Image (spheres, rainbow, N blue to C red):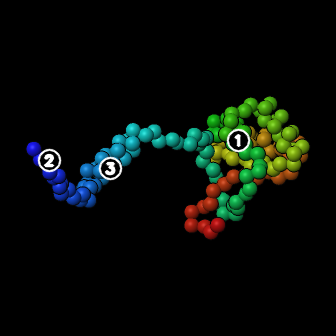
Amino acid sequence: MRFERIKRRTEIRKGQLDIAPLIDVMFLLLIFFMLTSNFVFQPGIKVSLPKAVTSEVLGSESLVVTVTGQDLLYLDDKPVSIGELQGRLRQAAREKRGLLLKSDTGASLGRVVEIWDLCRDYGIPQINIATTQKAGEGA
């Protein structure tokens, strides 16, 4: 028996990968994750601010006091009592911080004036009232 060398003729061809199924799978994964994800909504206090023509943009270093339509008080989006608010206003006066008062249009004027008087008593250097621009007016 004689062993002969058998030459193999093998050629390596570069194949083409069909990406259509890959695109289909990626599209289905995208839809799956979009439908199953939880949309995160920023919690906040619903306040309908009064409209004014002469409003201007302020810095964010001020203390923010919010009065809701039910006369509830919030300090930097956290509910506070009038006693806690007085303590924080004293501290803000010592630090020479200003105050931004966000009051709902349905809030009682008495509550707003009470907070305004506290600020003046403690010597808060700057008291601002938050408003929105009237429709059709310039900024």
Instruction: Tell me how far mark 3 sits from mark 1, CA to CA.
Output: 42 Å
Q: Position of residue 39 (x, y in %)?
A: 47, 42
* Outermost residue to the left: 1
Task: Determine which quarter of the picture holds residue 35.
Answer: top left
Q: What residue appears at the point 87 percent right and 48 percent down from the top-left corner?
A: 96
Out of 102 and 2, give the one closest to the viewer: 2
Q: Is residue 21 left or right of residue 119?
A: left
Labels 2 and 1: the sequence-earlier one: 2
Q: Label 3 belongs to which residue?
A: 27
The disc labelled 1 sits on which kind of residue? Asp
- Name which of mark 2 and mark 3 comes first in the sequence: 2
Pointer 1 local density, CA inside 10 Å: few below 14, some 14–19, many at least 20: few
Work out whether residue 31 can be spotted.
no
Q: Mark 3 near mark 1, Cβ–Cβ under 8 Å?
A: no
Residue picked out by circle 2: 3
Seen in the picture, residue 6 relative to 39 is either above or below; the reply is below
Q: Secondary structure at mark 3?
A: helix
Identify the residue at horizontal 51%, vertical 41% (top origin).
40
Q: Could you tell me residue 47's position as x and y percent?
A: 61, 45
Judged left or right of residue 38, residue 23 is: left
Question: The disc labelled 2 sits on which kind of residue?
Answer: Phe
* Quarter of the image with the C terminus in it: bottom right
Percent of width and height locating residue 128:
76, 52
Tell me the crowding category of disc 2: few under 14, some 14 to 19, or many 20 or more residues within 10 angstroms, Cα based.
Answer: few
The answer to which of marks 3 and 1 sits earlier in the sequence is 3
SS type, badge 2: loop
